Amino acid sequence: MSFNRALVKKHAEWLAARGVLIGTSSWKYRGWCGQLYDESRYLWRGKFAEARFERDCLSEYAEVFKTVCVDAAYYTFPSERYLEGLAAQVPADFRFGLKVTDEITIRRFPNLPRFGARAGQSNERFLNADLFASAFLKPCESIRTKVGVLIFEFSRFYSTDYAHGREFLADLDRFLGTLPKGWPYAVELRNRPWLTPEYFACLARHGVTHVFNSWDAMPSVAAQMQLTGSRTNPELVAARFLLKPGRKYEDAVKAFQPYDGIKEVNQEARQAGADLIQEAVKAVARRLVLLFINNRLEGNALETIAAIIALALRDEHPEGLEPPNLPLSAAPEFRGELPL
């Protein structure tokens, strides 16, 4: 399905009024010019100004979508100035998904150039709640009303990190128990065997959301949704559609750049996203649902979102996917309050 900007905007607003926010993982993709972005807005002396685009395009993004996942926060602790700069570009009902900086979630630094001398070394700051509160939460305070979810993304652990999943779970349980209350926390796990009833029970006990995630060595989102207890927080549901299970990140980058169109349809992922939307819209109790779609799932997150929305609303709005001719008050309304 092609990306109809006006129609997606209309449906995104309709869904947002019901607590369902759908958006992308990051937003600075020039390949989206002509779909989401008007390239002429970023010209300087007749040439495309990359710096202007990266600085200003979030405001144009927020004309259509009500949420985005800020991947940049994963690589360095975000400053208050940076976060306020993002918040200034979006409306009051916009919600950010923020990936917590890996300084908190990595137990042993990978052998990657960006870690320098720390590569291969143990991380003494792993699951340091005090550091998280001071270096991550404190800057977030200034944009708290626009924070939709804070995601602790744990990359795949190996036997050198934890011999058994229960050892990680014990550390996670202690960490979650010491976090400041009142924030929308979520955990994204990359160890398939650790998706156990005990893991889900731990998150539920702390009111923390399990992030359904489509990733290389993980079960599909649809399979995770079928696991007993996987909806660990009745007030917040989150999903990130990142990669087709079984595909390496680097392979997806090579195959799908510059992300200007669909290269491969993933019908199972689309249906899972649609099912999460339908589940939320039909629920009696209102909840906040955040869905983040990555370019590396199919090649173009915008067209994937259009397809997911079309699939989700097909039965309810068969006539051109038009929302029903009813005032929003006819359905339980989500007014934008965070489920804290």
Image (cartoon, rainbow, N blue to C red):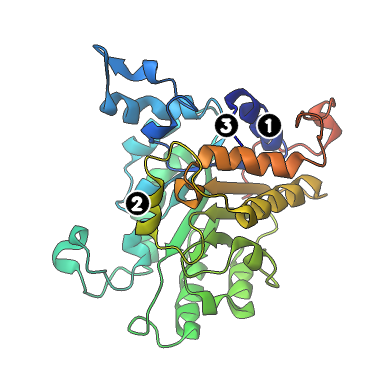
Judged from this view, the residue extending furthest toward the left is: 117
Three-letter amino acid code of the residue under disc 2: Lys
Compared to residue 275, the image places residue 219 above or below, namely below
Near-viewer residue (84 or 119): 119
- Do labels 3 and 2 touch, CB within 8 Å? no
The kind of secondary structure element at disc 2 is helix
Residue at screen point 26% across, 28% down: 51
Q: Please tell me whether mark 2 or mark 1 is closer to you in this view.
A: 2
Q: Earlier in the sequence, mark 3 or mark 2?
A: 3
Q: Closest to the observer: 184 or 199?
A: 199
Q: Position of residue 64 (x, y in %)?
A: 56, 28
What residue is disc 3 on? 3
- Which is nearer the N-term, disc 2 or disc 1? 1
| Point 30% across, 68% down: residue | 125
Which residue bears the numbered disc 2?
A: 254
Give the number of the mark in front: 3 or 1: 3
Q: Residue 335 location in percent, x, y?
A: 69, 35
Mark 3 or 1 closer to N-term? Answer: 3
How far apart marks 3 and 1 lie (CA) works out to 12 Å
Residue 43 shows up from this direction? yes
- In the image, residue 158 sits, relative to residue 330, either above or below, namely below
Tell me what residue is drawn at x 79 percent, y 50 percent: 285
- Secondary structure at badge 3 equals loop
Task: Give the numbered dot on residue 11.
Answer: 1
Dot 1: few (<14), some (14–19), or many (≥20) neighbours within 10 Å? many
Whole-percent x, y for residue 229 in the image: 69, 70
Mark pair 2, 1: CA separation: 32 Å
Q: Position of residue 268 (x, y in %)?
A: 64, 57
Q: Mark 3 to mark 2: distance in Å?
A: 23 Å
Q: Which mark is residue 56?
A: none
> Where the N terminus falls, by quadrant?
top right
Q: Is residue 31 above or below residue 24?
A: above
